[in-house]
Image: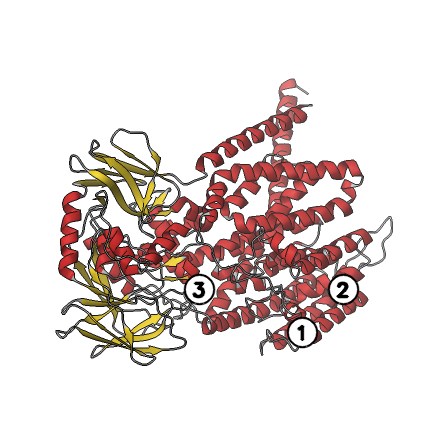
Amino acid sequence: MPPAVEAARAEDETVRDEAERHRGDGRRRFAVLRAPAAAALLTAVLFCLATRLSRTYPFGPVTRNTVDLGQQYLPFHAYWRAFLLGETHGDAFLNWNSGFGSNFLGDIGTYLSSPFDLLVVLFPADRVELALYVVTTAKITAAAAAMALLLPRLRPGPWPVAAVLGTAYALSGWTLDHGSTVPMWLDGLVALPLLCLVGEWARTGRRPVLGPLVVALAWIANFYTAYMATLGAAVVLAVRLLTAEETAGARRRLAGALRAARSVLIGIGLAAPLVTVVFLATKVADPTPGTVFAPAPWTDVLARFLPATASVASPALFVGTPALALALTLPFNRAVAPRVRAGLTAAIVLVTLSLQWEPTHLLWHAGASPNGIPYRQAFVLCGLVIVAAWFSVARGAPRPVVLLAGVALLGALAWTARGSAEIDRWTFPASGAAVLLALAAVPLALAADRRGPASPARPARRPPGARVLPVLAVVLLVAAQAGEVAVSGKRIEEQRRNEVSWSPRVGPWQETAAAETARADAWPRYRTDPGEVPGGNDVLLVGGQGADYYSSLTSDVTSRTLDSLGFGHYAKGRHPISLDNPVADALFSIGTRLRSEPTEPVRQDALPRATVTATTTPVPPLVTVRPVGRPATHPGDSAFARQERLLGADVYELPAPSRTGRTTLAARCPAGSQLWFWAPEYQGTAALAGERPVDFDGEPPSVRAPMRALGTVPDSGTVRIDLGPEGTVRLPREPIGCLVRARLDSAVRRLTADGATRVRATGHTVTAQLPPGSEGTAVLAAPRISGWRCAAGDADPRPARAYEGLVAVPLDGRASTVSCSFRPPGLKLGGAVGATALLALALTWLAHRRRARR
């Protein structure tokens, strides 16, 4: 054969071999991805179905903005969208909108650092609720896909079952009851299977660079639940090291554990620039009252394995009755190696016990027992149950005797939990229907596993319909899973919105307020406060630069400073609220204030509407100067006296009220002055004689009522206040302040004349031009939180001083400018740790390449 022909044939064979190899690679990639893809699709459909059945937005008219979803996550995502599109005054360091200036990088790391949160930019500003729902759904579906990806790597098995179990994990009771309304926790749900996958790579000596990157991504997305997921992945890795055949021998186990530790340490180091900022911000955050852990009754714990149960006082452990039944068969399934059965069973039992013991409870929560939901780590136990179910079914459906044993355990669990208050009227019907569907799938799966007799000349024969039977079995499993999830999601949503606080949907009220705020905004010449808009965190939703701010990182300085000046708060101090008071407006340079009046009752199933008015008044600039030694004549610690000390002028008359009976106060004030009532711990109404009652909602320590105006003092100067208390009357020593407006106007004129002639504010800096020869103290109308550094003139920046809780700079008469800049504490330290981790990752990659070449 001519050489040219041979060469052509050889080239054709090479091309065919290459094409075949690519086809093989494509088939392998499809085989790897089909379980995650199926799990993600099924999860998205079922989650949306549960939302539709509960008539909740976006598949119904009812709000889903319960508790923190409406007051924290929705407003933060609205602001995040505006920030990413360059529509905010602040930058990644400082949020000028909230709390008169807050540490935004800390809030990013707490609420917004997940890659999924970037999806908000794809939605218009008036569809932020839809954007948050899509973000939530995307995280849940990603968790399903991640678990479906992990399971076949722990043990080969049927991909449809892996997909169903991935869905069971992602739509657990923890997700439906907690995660779906606290979207930042859902990143931990995604992280757990991914971190288990990192453990598998470390155990087998694979992917030494990708592993740390996955850890870093998990900790950046949400370090709080990533910490819990890391502990859970460590439990799974320990079981695998002790039970897997590939890691037999102490040396291999130790090597695998060290590789895993290296991946975790490098990954956390890479996340340090953000994690360190959040960690140090929590150290200076307003402290919540200490919580003593009280374990839930075991009947309630067992009840939470069942569908349609909801509570914040017990762990949410529902993963679907079929998945739970499969997990309960593991101890009896001889198709699984004894050491694997023992290891996984022991891990589940120990983790369950750890939920109920205070020392391990504190370990799961990084040493601090949380307020609110005490079982935030329950998703880890849900994941372990799913892993156990997979090991019991991966090699084929368990034998009938094994299934009977598992179902018997399930029946005992349900019988023990029958008296729990957590049981809903739908619990046992939904669970029973799921059991029947799952049991109907078993004979189909067993029939599909049977083969005819085999011989060397004739392979084993599959029975007729063998291809159809597994499909029918999976369909029944999906039906069981879908029914329970739909019922559970519907019932949990209905119970939640009937029992906890809620915020209305974003609608015309917020849109009108946003338009008025944008029209009036004159930052940094003065602030614009949008007032009270339903939902909380108003300035994040509608714009402006007010006091309203709700974050886990609300600085203690901010909370204490505003409390001392008569502002109110919710959430035990971490949610300061706006104060509609002219003295406070002068202190914080609030030149325009919006006031809203709802035109109809605010309902769960309707868009809120209101009339919004804007009022602009002269106020001092953002930076003012306090002369040396100008004490207010009113001593004491009342909010009125503190306002005067910060203002540097006496603007109130503070009469000593006398009581006429239990519910009437009497005093004398200057005629025509404005009567203010300050009773932060009072709950009830207060009314100036002849005026409408004003509500106060003090409920220490959670809620502090702001000072409120009761009306104008009559010409007689005699004041009578009628109280309508709802409990014990708790009043401070000086509850009444009579504001003389002429005195306030004079103080405003003086502060304006002595204050900055020009103020320039960029992302996280403020520069002010002062009148020549200014002496005393320059005061920036922002709480002096950690991270502020200031300088007068050309001096070197130093940590800012405080003046009655606000940022202050000493003046000696020579400087004509002051400048202040904010840098989140921990950023420099975190950057150094991150750089070191990056170097370690590079060295790991080089060492891996060197070993590969050998």
**Of labels 3 and 1, the one closer to you:** 3
Q: Is residue 723 above or below residue 318?
A: below
Count of labels shown?
A: 3
Q: Amino acid type of disc 2? A: Ala
Residue 405's spot in the image, x, y percent? 78, 68
Residue 846's spot in the image, x, y percent? 60, 26
Q: CA distance from mark 1 to mark 2?
A: 35 Å
Q: Which residue is the site of mark 1?
A: 417
Q: Which residue is the site of mark 3?
A: 701
Q: Which residue is the site of mark 2?
A: 447
Q: Is residue 688 above or below residue 401?
A: below
Q: Is residue 114 visible?
A: no
Helix, strand or loop for disc 2: helix
Q: Residue at x 66, y 59 (%)?
A: 357
In which quarter of the view is residue 717 placed? Answer: bottom left
**Which labelled disc corresponds to residue 253?**
none
Q: Amino acid type of disc 1? A: Ala
Give 196 or 675, whichever is nearer the viewer: 675
Q: Is residue 129 above or below residue 121?
A: below
Helix, strand or loop for disc 3: loop
**Extreme residue toward the top, this view:** 3
Residue 183 relative to residue 634: left or right: right
In which quarter of the view is residue 263 placed? Answer: top right
Q: Earlier in the sequence, mark 1 or mark 2?
A: 1
**Of labels 1 and 2, the one closer to you:** 1
